[in-house]
Image (spheres, helix red, strand yellow):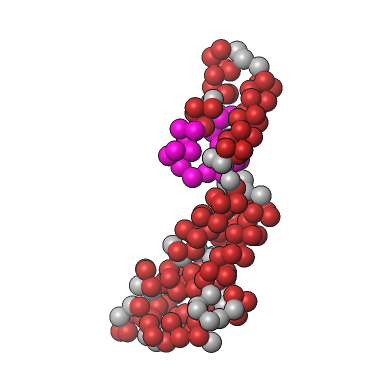
Amino acid sequence: MHNIAVHYLERFSASREAVRRVLERRAFKANRVHEGDPEQARTWITEILDTLQRQGFLDDSRYAETAARSLAARGHSLRAIRSRLAAKGVDRDHVDSALHRLAEDMAPAGRDAQDTDPDLVAALAYARRRRLGPWRLPEVQAEHRHKDMAALARRGFSSETVRKILDATDPDEAEALLEE
């Protein structure tokens, strides 16, 4: 079981809960075939997870920060990031800490993290990458406005953030929103 966990962690960055789920699935399959004791398997899994954590293979705090940065860079809102990390079984304290650090990192140079809206930064990154709103050709911006609003809303951004971006007429005006 230890080797299964290590092999999984070599391939994927994962939370403690995600590794627990992988090991429990493997143990469940093995117990069906070999008629093992499920309680004994749970005990072993907990011991393996504790060992991996002591060895530094598992660190939910580091996982939460890395995943939050990655999701934000791909244009996910803080709400979507929080939801995704919770689904992966990351503890609420680790999620809060990761989102706080993310907000600090996303603040432009010389600005306080509390003055910067991390959702606006992520929404701009997503709109830029997908060529939504002000990054569309000017002649088609109006006809695609509803579609762009829907795309940003599906990413978890508030209607206020979406409107700010889509009300900008060109990319420079949209980027200037960060300076406000």
Q: Is residue 75 left or right of residue 23?
A: left
Task: Indicate yes or no whether the magenta region holds residue 15.
Answer: yes
Residue closest to the eye, 149 or 102: 102
Residue 106's place in the image compared with 88, above or below, is below
At 56% from the left and 60% from the top, the residue drawn is 80
Which residue is located at x 57 percent, y 69 percent? 103
Residue placed at 55% from the left, 50% from the top?
Answer: 63
Does any portion of residue 164 appear in the rendered image?
A: no
Q: What is the x, y in percent for residue 52?
A: 58, 35
Magenta segment: 6-25
Across and down, in percent, residue 109 comes to: 50, 79
Q: Tell me which secondary structure the magenta stretch mostly adopts.
A: helix
- 75 relative to 172, above or below: above
Left/right of residue 24 with respect to residue 131 in the rendered view: right
The N terminus lies in quadrant? top right
Viewer can see residue 62: yes
**Residue 23 on the magenta segment:** yes
